[in-house]
Image (tube, rainbow, N blue to C red):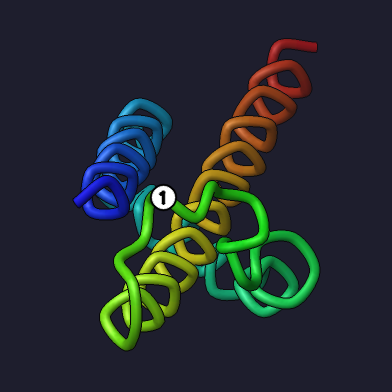
């Protein structure tokens, strides 16, 4: 149950950040593209198996717990990649605005 709540909070935080950064609907496309580019690196080096970061009490015992770890690891990898992509897009927008003013 705690794993589900954690996953939902992570998805909600990611969605709100992406919504905040995307000033126009088409901005979602480059954010999605950047997220796809950084997803493999996030899955291998940063998030991977989230059970090593979270307490054991978050997951159920037995096979259900293993399934929760796998699903939460995938959700965390996707959300962290989307958060990083949104941050990169926001930085690109900021640089573009600064260059355009001068």
Quarter location, residue 48: bottom right
Give residue 1's position: percent from left, percent from top.
Answer: 19, 51
Give residue 76's position: percent from left, percent from top.
Answer: 48, 59
Q: Name the residue under label 1.
A: 57
Which residue is farthest front? 61
Q: Is residue 77 left or right of residue 101?
A: left
Give residue 60's position: percent from left, percent from top.
Answer: 30, 66
Please tell me how crowded label 1 is: few (under 14), some (14-19), or many (20+) other residues with Cα within 10 Å: few
Q: From where the camera sits, is residue 34 visible?
A: yes
Q: In this view, does 9 lie to the left or right of 27?
A: left
Q: Which residue is drawn at 27% across and 46% down?
A: 2
78 or 71, which lies in front? Answer: 71
Q: Which residue is drawn at 58% across and 32% down?
A: 90
100 lies above or below 82: above
Which residue is farthest top? 101
Quarter location, residue 17: top left
29 lies above or below 69: above
37 lies above or below 72: below
17 lies above or below 101: below
Q: From where the camera sits, is residue 24 visible?
A: no
Q: Is mark 1 on a helix, strand or loop?
A: helix
Which quadrant holds the C terminus? Answer: top right
Give residue 71's position: percent from left, percent from top.
Answer: 35, 74
27 or 97, which lies in front? Answer: 27
Q: Residue at x 58, y 51 (%)?
A: 85
Q: Residue at x 54, y 74 (%)?
A: 36
9 or 20, which lies in front? Answer: 9
């Amino acid at each position: 149950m705690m794993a589900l709540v954690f996953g939902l909070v992570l998805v909600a935080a990611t969605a709100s950040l992406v919504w905040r950064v995307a000033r126009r609907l088409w901005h979602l496309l480059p954010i999605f593209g950047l997220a796809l580019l950084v997803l493999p690196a996030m899955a291998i080096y940063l998030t991977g198996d989230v059970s090593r970061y979270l307490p054991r009490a978050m997951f159920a015992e037995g096979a259900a717990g293993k399934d929760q770890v796998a699903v939460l690891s995938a959700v965390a990898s996707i959300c962290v990649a989307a958060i990083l992509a949104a941050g990169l897009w926001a930085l690109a927008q900021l640089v573009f605005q600064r260059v355009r003013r001068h």
